[in-house]
Image (cartoon, helix red, strand yellow):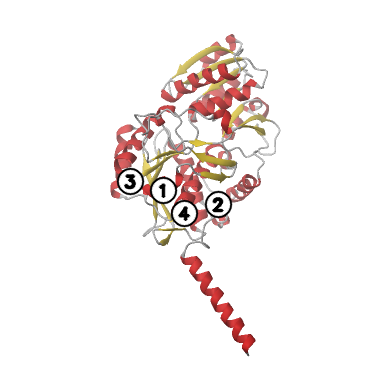
Amino acid sequence: MKSSFVKVTVAVFLCLIFAWSLSQGKAMAFEPLKGNMSTFMPTKSVQITGDSIKIGLLNPFSGAAASSGELFFLTMAWVAHDINSQGGILVDGKEKKIQFILGDTQVKPQIANKVTERLILEDKVDAIVGTSGTHITVIAQALAGKYKKVFVNNCSFSDLLLDKDNWNPYVFQACPNTTQWMLAMGNFYSKRPEKKFYLLCQDYAYGHAIAEKFKEAIKKYKPEAQIVGEDFHAIFLKDFAPYLTKIQASGAEVIISSDWSADNENLVKQSRQMGMKTPIASIYVDDPNVLQTVGGPAGAGMVILQTNIPSINIPLNNKFNELWNAAWQKWERPYNNALYKWPANFLGSSAMSLYWLFDVMQRAKTTNSEKIIKIWEGDTYESFTGKLHMRSQDHLMLSEIFLSELVFPNKWFPNCAAWGPTVAIPRDLCTPPVINERK
């Protein structure tokens, strides 16, 4: 009888300890990719209401750049579903699920200002994530500082976003800036035979920054290299022929481009229609929908530069690929096309930035901006593709940057070029100087 009594007492004691640990949030911590992703359907994602963690998703959801919003909606929905299916996050004394509220910027400054203020003042969001367009991100950062709300920049890259005029302590840049991208690009080409480069970029702040930073980086890592031409074109250009003719005549061995969305599509298509084989190197050149239109061999040799590439052979990244692709098999329009088949490019990198934000909230046990800042400054996070570090001085993410030459055939797509083996540029070789004057 005594033995049975002791066993029951021990069992009750262990149950009490387990219940107490749950109340402390120790047994309920979420882990990326531990949720039930087999039930995830982006077009039918369940929106949480009530007492929740509210995230403002700031991006264009209408107009010429609506495809950008479509992409970032998908990654936000994915991460929210993963965490919510695990029960949410213990913050401010309660287990809360994630609700995200859209702010459609239309990539127009006046509208962006209005919708960002609406997210903060009316929707009462706990943090804001976005956004496409440096000129829009500048507005969002200023309002984040004004209203003391954390703003996570995961898709604008101009260095000026971190200078003394535009940065404030509520801003966290969870993506590389142009200096990081181009230091990695310069280092990559320092170990390859190509020596003649042509710069073709969009005619606005980001395009000019890419050109200038590449020139600095290639001079540092490969001083014998030549810039054989440099042009800037209007955004959403229809006819690239005049520029491509100049590139053909220049003898360029590589085209360095900043072009995204429709411009990337037109540049790739028109260059191949003209019979050009000169590889294009950029952050955006691995779009499978574009590469399918030019045919498999025509896309081979192009070079993608990113923080997330499916061919990065790390166990957690492999798991991410497998879970994502399995879920994709059941998705409906617009997410059932080749662009979304794998979590490549900004699909993967934006998902990593969101998991990091919510992991910080989980460790801070609050949505309070000041406490989030305290945890995130100087933080190191193990992502799908390796360690990410948040620099204390200016809240810039530092990490390895990966490059991959597209190959055909490959295991990813049957009818277009895609990622080959990756080259990792170490963090120390692509870390930019601090440019703000934080006190």
What amino acid is labelled 4 in the image? Gln
| Residue that label 3 marks | 119
Q: Nearer the viewer, mark 2 or mark 4?
A: 4
Element class at badge 4: helix
Question: N-terminal of the two: label 4 or label 3?
Answer: 3
Of residue 178 and residue 118, the one placed in the foreground of this image is 178
Element class at badge 2: loop
Q: Nearer the viewer, mark 4 or mark 3?
A: 4
Of residue 421 and residue 114, the one placed in the foreground of this image is 421
Q: Nearer the viewer, mark 3 or mark 1?
A: 1
The label number, if any, that marks residue 362 in the structure image: 4
Q: Is 389 drawn above or below residue 194 in the view shown?
A: below
Question: N-terminal of the two: label 3 or label 1?
Answer: 3
Alpha carbon of mark 4 to alpha carbon of mark 1: how far? 10 Å
Mark 1–mark 2 CB contact (< 8 Å): no
What amino acid is labelled 1 in the image? Ile
**Measuring 35% from the left and 49% from the top, which residue is drawn there?**
125
Question: N-terminal of the two: label 4 or label 1?
Answer: 4
Alpha carbon of mark 3 to alpha carbon of mark 1: how far? 19 Å
| Residue that label 2 marks | 32
Of residue 264 and residue 165, the one placed in the foreground of this image is 165
What amino acid is labelled 2 in the image? Pro
Q: Is residue 72 visible?
A: yes
Please state the horizontal and vertical placement of residue 416, each as a whole percent of the image.
Answer: 65, 32
Q: Is residue 179 left or right of residue 426?
A: left
Alpha carbon of mark 1 to alpha carbon of mark 2: how far? 19 Å
Q: Quadrant of the N terminus?
A: bottom right
| Residue that label 1 marks | 372
